[in-house]
Image (tube, rainbow, N blue to C red):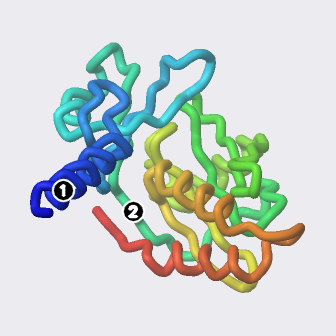
Amino acid sequence: MTGALARLIRGAADARAETAERCDLCGEPVADDHRHLLDTGGGGGEDLLCACRACSLLFVDDGAAGGRYRPVPTRRLRLPPVDTAALGAPVGLAFFVVGRDGTPAGHWPSPAGATRWEADPGAWRRLADGCPALAALEPGVEALLVHTARGARHHWIVPVDDCFRLVAVVRREWRGLSGGDRVWGAVDDFFAQLTERP
């Protein structure tokens, strides 16, 4: 009986190891709180990659690998309310990422994933002129995350991977045509758990 129990425990551990997230660069298992890298050289787009500690340290210098892999920072900063109406957000839950050329792109979480629209560059510049923290946003890897739906007033600078975690929450919890109460409860929980990090 002891041998059978040991085999069962070992089999469960092996199954967990097989399903554990792995580093997209070297294949090593990664911790739950692993870092991400932005791969700027993918086939026509940019992709977020999971990185083990060793691989994430390799690309701390922005010039490593010719700048192809950029570490996603961990900074989170809560902002006072920012008037994003001029950016043309069609919904009250959105995030804005600036490209290396300074062009802003808006996204909103939907049951189909992140939906994108082109934000007005002039409006973004005016907004950044009035908020120095936005002017210092790291292109491609940090975002302005805004939640003004249903009376909320959240404005954050966050790592771009936080935005995609929010997209996953919306996709997972969305019910029916309007999303239902369940999705909004999960969105509120997401924002309640955000904490500032320098």
Q: Which residue is mark 2?
A: 76
Marks 2 and 1, Cα distance to the nearest angstrom?
48 Å
Please give the label number shown on residue 4: 1
187 versus 15 height, above or below = below
Q: Count the numbered circles shown.
A: 2
Q: What element does badge 2 sit on? A: loop
Question: Which residue is at 52% across, 73% downward?
Answer: 190
Q: Residue furthest toward the right? A: 177
Taking the spot 78% from the left edge, 70% from the top edge, the residue there is: 175
Near mark 1 (Cα within 10 A), the count class, few <14, some 14-19 or many ≥20, is few
Side of 187 relative to 23 (left or right): right
Residue 44 position, x and y percent, is 62, 17
Q: Answer few, some or many: residues within 10 Å of disc 2's Cα (few below 14, many 20 plus, some between 14 and 19).
A: some
Q: Quadrant of the C terminus?
A: bottom left
Query: Looking at this view, is 14 or 91 the one in front?
Result: 14
Q: Quadrant of residue 153?
A: bottom right
Q: Position of residue 162 (x, y in %)?
A: 48, 57
Secondary structure beneath label 1: helix
Q: Mark 2 or 1 closer to N-term?
A: 1
Horizontal and vertical percent for residue 127? 64, 57
Image depth: mark 2 or mark 1 in front: 1
Closer-to-camera residue (185/172) = 172
Left/right placement of residue 187 relative to residue 91 reads: left
Return the residue found at the far front.
1
Residue type, mark 2 in image: Arg
Tell me where residue 59 sits by quadrant: top left
Q: Quadrant of residue 104?
A: top right
Q: Residue at x 47, y 36 (%)?
A: 48
Residue type indicated by callout 1: Ala
